[in-house]
Amino acid sequence: MAVRTIRVFGDPVLRQACAPITEIDEGVHALVADLLDTVALPGRAGVAAPQIGVGLRAFSYNVDGVIGYILNPVLVEVSGEPEPIGEGCLSVPNLWHDAVRHPHARVTGIDLAGDEVELEGDGLFAQMLQHETDHLDGMLYLARLTPEERKIAMREIRESSW
């Protein structure tokens, strides 16, 4: 359908927990199409619905050439020792900091047909699953930074031109 504008830090939609999708209608089909179009641009690993201004539990992903989506995702498992890993966010442009993430993650949800979907992976895919489900819970990756890193990031945000 369309590549949508990404909402940035300070927009209230990014700080609110998203509502579950209760009916898969034309609006949800259009949302998924927009999420897929928006994540397909180079350098994007994931786009959550609130990042395009929609407060519903849905996200798209684009990792290692695999593009997809999930509705009503729930992070059901993380494993491995959490470790700091370089991370950025389209909603906090041009910042890159070490967020603490688990090396493995599993998410369950549904697709547009209402069928169960499970996404599971390691490395970048696990990081994306955790990052995007955080968005749906109203949390930016900045909350996953150490206090020292968060202080630096907040200063960079205050000094940014966006």
Image (tube, grey):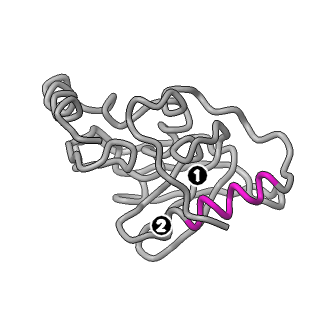
| Residue under pointer 1 | 59
Q: Secondary structure at mark 2?
A: strand
Q: Secondary structure at mark 1?
A: strand
| Above/below status of 140 relative to 112 | above
Q: Residue at x 51, y 45 (%)?
A: 51
User: Mark on residue 62?
Assistant: 2
Looking at the magenta stretch, what is its main secondary structure?
helix
Q: Position of residue 148 (x, y in %)?
A: 13, 25
- Magenta residue check for 149: no
User: Does the residue at mark 1 contact the one at mark 2 (Cβ under 8 Å)?
Assistant: no
- Magenta residue check for 29: yes
Q: Nearer the viewer, residue 27 or 74?
A: 27
Q: Residue at x 19, y 23 (%)?
A: 147
Which quadrant of the figure contains the N terminus? bottom right
Q: Residue furthest bottom?
A: 65
In the picture, measured across the screen, residue 9 lies left or right of residue 151, that is right
Q: CA distance from mark 1 to mark 2?
A: 10 Å
| Above/below status of 140 relative to 108 | above
Q: Position of residue 65 (x, y in %)?
A: 45, 76
In the picture, measured across the screen, residue 148 lies left or right of residue 83, that is left
Q: What range is drawn magenta here?
A: 27-37
Q: Residue at x 21, y 47 (%)?
A: 96
In the picture, measured across the screen, residue 139 lies left or right of residue 108, that is left
